[in-house]
Amino acid sequence: MIKKIFLLLFSCSLLVVLFPAISFANVGDTTIEEIAQNLTGVFWTIFAGAVVIGFIYSGIIFLTSAGDPQKLEKAKKAFLYSLAGTVVGILGYGITELIKSELFN
């Protein structure tokens, strides 16, 4: 049940992010720098939504565990995976910003 809710929320967040990005696409006189900025913005928004959903998911598991050691362990793993994903995403964003600043400035 929780996986279905997670997939539904994630799908809705993708739709909310991607439809405006696609509908406002200006194909005419765009440069590579503008395309890179737009893609980075879209991916960063998707990433932020996934991070929030991951932490909410781990919190729900923790709150509904009712002291069950297996569910607590599952909640800890979900939290650690969310935290690791956050660190990797922030590092990836920082690296792409560094590359963009070196290439386009």
Image (spheres, rainbow, N blue to C red):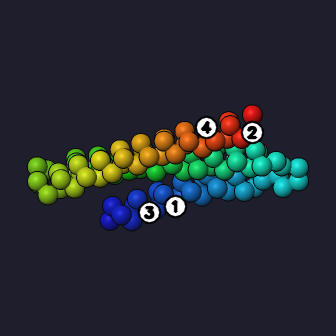
Residue type at mark 3: give it.
Leu
Task: Give the SS element for disc 2.
Answer: helix
- Report the residue marked by disc 2: 104
Between 13 and 40, the one nearer to me in the picture? 40
- Report the residue marked by disc 3: 7
- Report the residue marked by disc 1: 11
Give the label on residue 98, or none.
4
Nearer the N terminus, badge 1 or badge 2? 1
Label 3, label 2: how far apart the Cα atoms are: 37 Å
Label 1, label 4: how far apart the Cα atoms are: 30 Å
Between 76 and 17, the one nearer to me in the picture? 76
Label 1, label 2: how far apart the Cα atoms are: 33 Å
Left or right position of 44 against 20: left
Mark 1: give few (<14), some (14-19) or many (20+) Cα within 10 Å: few
Q: Are marks 3 and 1 in contact (CB under 8 Å)?
A: yes
What's the residue at 74%, 49% (across, down)?
A: 35
